Amino acid sequence: MALLEVRGLEVTFPLRGAALTALRGVDFTLDAGERLGIVGESGAGKSMAAFAILNLISEPGRISAGEILFDGRDLARLSDNHMRAIRGNRIAMIFQDPMMTLNPVLTIGTQMVECLKAHQKIGEAEAKRRAIEKLREVAIPSPETRFDSYPHELSGGLRQRVVIAIALLLDPAIIIADEPTTALDVTIQAEIMGLMIALCENHNVGLILITHDIAVVSEITRRLIVMYAGRIVEAGPTAELIAAPRHPYTRGLLKALPQKNRPGGMLHQIPGTMPSLAAIPDGCAFHPRCEHADARCRRSVPALRDVGGRLVSCHHAERIS
Amino acid sequence: MSAVRAALQSNFVYRFLGDPVAMVSAGVLLLFVLGAALAPWIAPQNPYDPLQIDIMDSEIPPVWQAEGEARFVFGTDAQGRDMLSTILYGTGISLTIGVFAVLLQGLIGVTIGLISGYYGGRVDGFFMRLADIQLSFSTLMVAIIVLAVFQAAFGVGLYEELAIIMLILVIGIAEWPQYARTVRANVLAEKEKEYVDAARVIGLSRLRIMFRHILPNTLSPILVISTVQVANAIVAEAALSFLGLGMPVTKPSLGSLIRAGFEFIFSGTWWITIIPSIVLIVLILAINLLGDWLRDVLNPRLYKET
């Protein structure tokens, strides 16, 4: 049985009478120790899905349908107290910008000890010992001194290592990483990514990697979900999706990678922009930007269906390859 | 030792040493605080002890006047109390009321501000309307009503015993919206920051996030308004005392000293009212200048080019 199973997840924001649907019919599973990628442009609902798993959608938004099964419980319907025991403990999350995610006025040690104490009955000395052990595990030099440092005394790369150490502190079953390397220097990105993968493998932690960078995903995840306007448009094994995308949006994303271009050639782009939640077009949400769109695409929403071992939501999936 | 050295090298100390106004204000304030705290030992006379006061010494002018006596540097008041001693004791009373009233304001205001800003919605609406209502009554008006009713209901005798506590309570409660509004505004900005999301993702409780994570990030504006509020509270107390609703003449604050001397100002004994007034003005000025400086230092956006 899968470790985490998300079924028919729907998140809505009531707004002046109307309800904006930020996520619609999102299904996926994650096995223990598996690495899953979620890609899409800004506003596709990637981060929303991550917050929904932790049941942390900010007001007035809420999970309006679907279930999130984890450890035999439905997280979408768990009380806040029970949910708090899972956050940070069984499911941890890493954010994009390590400058922002650490509290600037508390030392790293304080923040780590606090996290441990929130979930376990544990003495100060023991908490400190375990925090330093984790700092050492993420290869932070001289962790004993770093324990008493403030976030601003560390470089971006070190800070993200601290954030990873905090995420791993309670040996979670799942880590959700929301663009964990986007804010970092390119030279450090690979290093941090490598560290995260190694740690996840050592501890058999399931990783959900949320990113807009399809190149990163292709290297480290086995399965991939592509999202557009709050829906899954294509999902399947990463290698296959990247070798032969069947949804025009996935194709567009891949073509837009600069390294796919000839030197000196024009960069490819997907025409238009992601629609706002308040104005999602009828039919297939992608049709105004799609080169294959026809009358049917404008009329009816394509269902997510199995096409040659993967899920695609496009009327023309068979024609595209 | 290293902590001391680090403190000495900090930007805070550096800026302090580079600013004569701040240094002089802090020096003056320190002088007042020390004078008030050490009053029982350094004051020539204990103005609360009737045995040390001789009515025959009344209305002696300050020492630099022709009829002045060396025993009484600032002269004496109508009851023969040494002005210097009463001012030293009175400054202590004024400062005590100012500081404790502000602590009370801070306690109420910061808690309400945090809850209001963090929870938002109806809770926020309720507390902020409450603050609006509170602010629409001026502090003095509330204080006059409460204190006058208390005096009428329980008699002046009991009032004189409880005067300090009553003044702290009234000024403390009347001014909480200042803190609540400032803190709320800062919480609204802070709670959108990612470290709050990160704290929620770690599974911390709301109370912990509010007091442990958000509160320390709003401390600098709290510090700045605290200095202004201490000055305001001292002035409010002085005004109440001047109106006869503050400290009794037997245990005078700076305000009640000014009032006590005011009756004699046209009969030529000006020192009873003028000297405490100057002390009050210098004290308030020192606190406010220090508060201004603190605001400049704690707000990085105001960094001047030096």
Image (spheres, coloured by chain):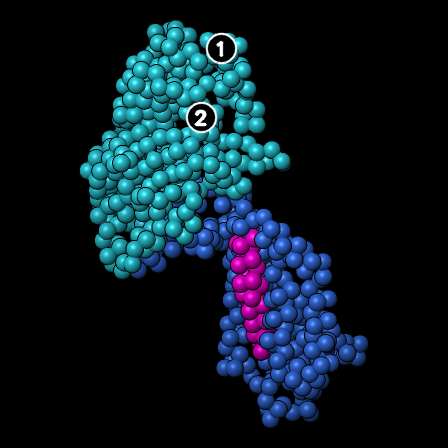
Specify the segment rendered in magenta: B88-116
Residue B269 coordinates in the image, percent (x, y): 74, 79
Q: Are marks 1 and 2 in contact (CB under 8 Å)?
A: no
Q: What residue type is disc 1 on?
A: Ala
Q: Nearer the viewer, residue A114 or B106?
A: A114
Colour representing chain B: blue
- Mark 1 to mark 2 CA distance (whole Å): 18 Å
The answer to whether residue A118 is seen in the rendering is: yes
Residue at image location 26% in from the left, 54% down from the top: A128
Q: Which residue is mark 2?
A: A231
Q: Which residue is mark 1?
A: A293
Residue at image location 44% in from the left, 13% down from the top: A315
Q: Nearer the viewer, residue B111 or B300?
A: B111
Residue A289 coordinates in the image, percent (x, y): 49, 14
Q: Quadrant of residue A4?
A: top left
Q: Which quarter of the rendering shows the C terminus of chain A?
A: top left
Which chain does the residue under circle 1 lie in? A
The label on residue A172 is: none
Does residue B85 lie above or below A43 as drawn?
Answer: below
The answer to whether B305 appears left or right of B56 in the picture is left
The answer to whether A264 appears left or right of B25 in the picture is left
Q: Assess disc 1: are there few (<14), some (14-19) or many (≥20) residues with their C-alpha within 10 Å of its C-alpha.
A: some
Does residue B120 lie above or below A17 as drawn?
Answer: below
Q: Nearer the viewer, residue B111 or A61?
A: A61
Residue at image location 65% in from the left, 82% down from the top: B160
Number of dots carrying numbers: 2
Residue at image location 27% in from the left, 36% down from the top: A1
Residue A277 coordinates in the image, percent (x, y): 53, 27
Q: What residue type is disc 2 on?
A: Arg
Disc 1 on helix, strand or loop?
Answer: loop
